[in-house]
Image (cartoon, rainbow, N blue to C red):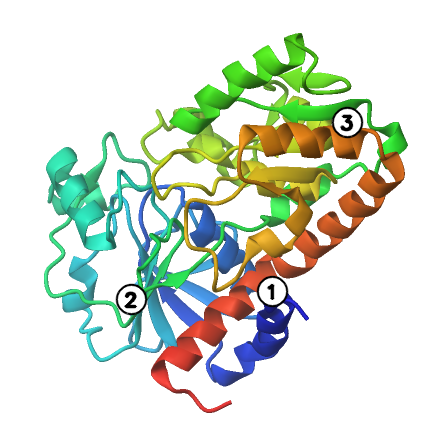
Amino acid sequence: MSKLDEVYRQCQGSELQFKRRAVLFIGSESYDAPTITVLQGLHKLGFTIYTLKKPNINSWFCNAVVDSLDHVRFDFVLSNLHWGTRWSYYERYKLWPYLKILIDGDDNQGNESWKAKYARYARSYVYDPPEALKSMKLHPYRWIEPLGDYKPDVVFTAQKVPGDSGTFYLPFGIHEEYMEFYEGKATHERDIDFAYIPGPGVRRERAEHWIRRLSRCRLLPGRIYNRPARGDEAAPEEIREYVAEDNNVHSYHRWTMSKVYFRILNRTKVLIYPGVSDSAWWDSKRPWEAYVSGCLVLMARPTIDVAEYPLTEICEYAVYNSTLELIEKSWFLYLRPRFLDKLRLTAVARAWQFFSTVAIARYFLARIASAIGLPK
């Protein structure tokens, strides 16, 4: 049994350790992929997600908005980083005695702790604007509140720095909305052998150039797709107005799904994923969108610490350590279509099982329960 299988098995039923099945979410005003995964999973497990005064970009699909906490009961308070988190609510509503959970889903600019990221944001964004502005549903700019006496009891980190023993690793995982784009094509129906879809980040930019050179020199086999895939965007009806009016402040546009992009993924046998940066910044939405579309993901070994929930065990063969190894594995897969078919189907099934929103939420709850010593 792999470690991934073992951790998954140990986390089953972890929601039963939380009696109220409710969370108070005091969240960032910025789209945050791992936080959304957890919230979607908690919602599917029957948890109520309370927010104060207004809905949140990360929880709009499930949050129960309340004006006060007089009759509200919950198991813990959940917050996440970036901008707009109402740290002042912890003092205003006397939340210090409650269990405080923090998700740091933000990108690393080097090997940063969550406190270092907060300090960087405090220098970058408007500091503590008037209450009237904070109460708006859409904001004209990014801002940040004083952290005050906030100190989380348990911290989860998506871009976990190797050697960080003070936080739990939290993968991005597969969002619920990706599932509707799966077309169910068999391997022989997929006409793109290897796809690379560019994006921001040093590793991504390098990969775009060397994949182009390798394909020109025929060092990568088969039909190669190596360009952006955009168009025919669809946004959820409930937040379409926010998507249209938000000028990349909250990043509501990240809730939109490009049908062109998912059609490319559904035509692809293998997606090449090099990571994002040379520092501890590896995860993104891309590999999870690929898995849910039925692709085998040929991934660079992560530069982050994933040992607590090892995504490398989705398919260990499909992890490469160098460009030479990527070339060798690409040819091996291309020349053995039956082996590729078996590997692809197995990897997709494992990704769907271990990195669904419910699986990630159970892992999240199990780590909290273990950290604070809840009885099983």
Task: Name the residue type under label 1.
Answer: Leu
Say which quadrant the N terminus sits in: bottom right
The structure residue drawn at horizontal position 27% and vertical position 38%, both measured from the top left corner, is 109
Give the residue pinned by disc 1.
Answer: 4
Name the residue furthest top.
216
Q: CA distance from mark 1 to mark 2?
A: 21 Å
The answer to whether mark 2 and mark 3 are in CB contact below 8 A is no
Residue neighbourhood size for the residue with mark 1, other residues' Cα within 10 Å, grouped as few (<14), some (14–19), many (≥20): some
Residue 227 can be seen, yes or no: no
The residue where tag 3 is placed is 267
| Residue 16 to residue 328: above or below | below
Query: Which label was assigned to residue 347?
Result: none
Q: How many marks?
A: 3
Mark 2 or mark 3: whose residue is earlier in sequence: 2
**Pointer 2 residue:** 166
Drawn side of residue 117 relative to residue 297, left or right: left
Of labels 3 and 1, earlier in sequence is 1
**Mark 3 is on which residue type?**
Arg
Q: Position of residue 131 (x, y in %)?
A: 14, 47
Residue occupying image coordinates x 40% and y 42%: 31
**At x 22% / y 46%, what residue is drawn?**
117
| Numbered disc 3: secondary structure | loop
At horizontal 52% and vertical 22% (from top left) the residue drawn is 198
Q: Residue 78 at x, y = what percent?
A: 35, 64
Dot in front, 3 or 1: 1
Q: Could you tell me if residue 117 is visible in this image?
A: yes
> Residue 222 appears at what percent x and percent y?
77, 19
